[in-house]
Amino acid sequence: MSAPSGRTVGFVGLGHMGTPMVSRLVDAGVTVRAYDASPEAREAFAAAVPGATVVGSASETADGAEAVLLCLPNSAIVESVVAELDGARVIVDMSSSEPLRTRALAASLADTGRVLVDAPVSGGVSGARAGTLAVMVGGPDDVVADLEPLLAAIGRPRHVGPVGAGHALKALNNLMSAAHLVASSEAVLVGEEFGLDPAVMLEVVNGSSGRSGSTENKWPNHILPGTYGAGFGIGLLVKDIHIALDLAASTSVPTRHAAATVALWDEALAELGPTADHTEIARWLRERKGTP
């Protein structure tokens, strides 16, 4: 297992998450060949991460790289980019993709002697900047072991199973996160209406059994101040929780609570739009008080 310093990777997808992730790799001594389909994103990235090399196409990221990492919006875009990566032997999909499509893509790549590893992340933009992302890795043991030092520069990698397992766990994680945010928001709004101080509520809850990532991070840092700047759009979250619901439908597990959670987020998406920060659902719920 070689250390990250001196290694070379490609990276496709230079958005809110991809840019700080590449910055962490560069800081660890990794040579990165980076690309984004958006010229504006490439320009902003070059200014933010001068230690990386920006190339002119996805295929060029594979030149001299032992692996190409992807941080893209969905499975369809991942599949279209992978079609351009003939020169990449190992492809690491760090997007929030559909696990069944990930398995199918991995099987098609295996027919040509290539390997797909899924390694989605959780922890938001702040976690990407700090290098503390949870990295959920699915793939063959030997390939994952070799990738772990690279992924450790980005966050805390954990091998969770065969290919597709990472994407399944990420979707289920985001489903739980979405449910926590709705439940905590409704509870805080009820308490506020009763006359409780939301800040005091959160302080007490965060030392009690009702705490969650929403009460410990999203409410105090993004909702109470009114900034709504967690850096994750509602459109992407709703995409992820639908992936989780589709995954549930492929099993025999009843998910009535999950279905209700997804339906509520669908309503919020329709009214707030896909680019609204997902923490804005708290504001949306506040404005709906008294609405049947």
Image (tube, grey):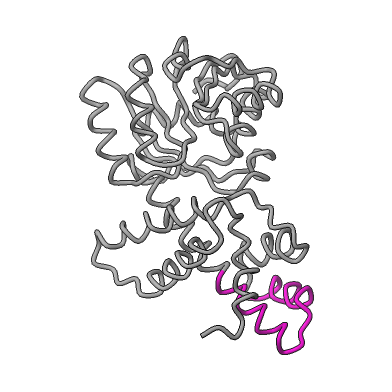
What main secondary structure does the magenta stretch of the protein show? helix
- Quarter holding residue 15: top right
Q: Position of residue 164 (x, y in %)?
A: 34, 43
Instruction: Say above or below: 228 vs 208.
Output: above
Which portion, as a residue range, is magenta? 182-208
Q: How many marks?
A: 0
Image position of 255 (left or right of 71): left
> Which residue reaches farthest top?
64
The answer to which of 14 and 209 lies nearer the viewer is: 14
Q: Position of residue 272 (x, y in %)?
A: 56, 61
Q: Residue at image x 28%, y 68%?
A: 253
Image position of 102 (left or right of 223): left
Instruction: Say above or below: 159 vs 188.
Output: above
Q: Residue at image x 45%, y 10%?
A: 63
- Quarter holding residue 28: top right
Q: Residue 268 colored magenta? A: no
> Which residue reaches farthest left?
111
Q: Position of residue 270 (x, y in %)?
A: 48, 62
Image position of 164 (left or right of 216): left
Q: Residue at image x 27%, y 62%?
A: 249
The answer to which of 184 and 251 lies nearer the viewer is: 184
The answer to which of 11 and 92 lies nearer the viewer is: 11
Q: Residue at image x 51%, y 19%?
A: 9
Q: Position of residue 192 (x, y in %)?
A: 72, 82
Instruction: Say above or below: 187 vs 218.
Output: below
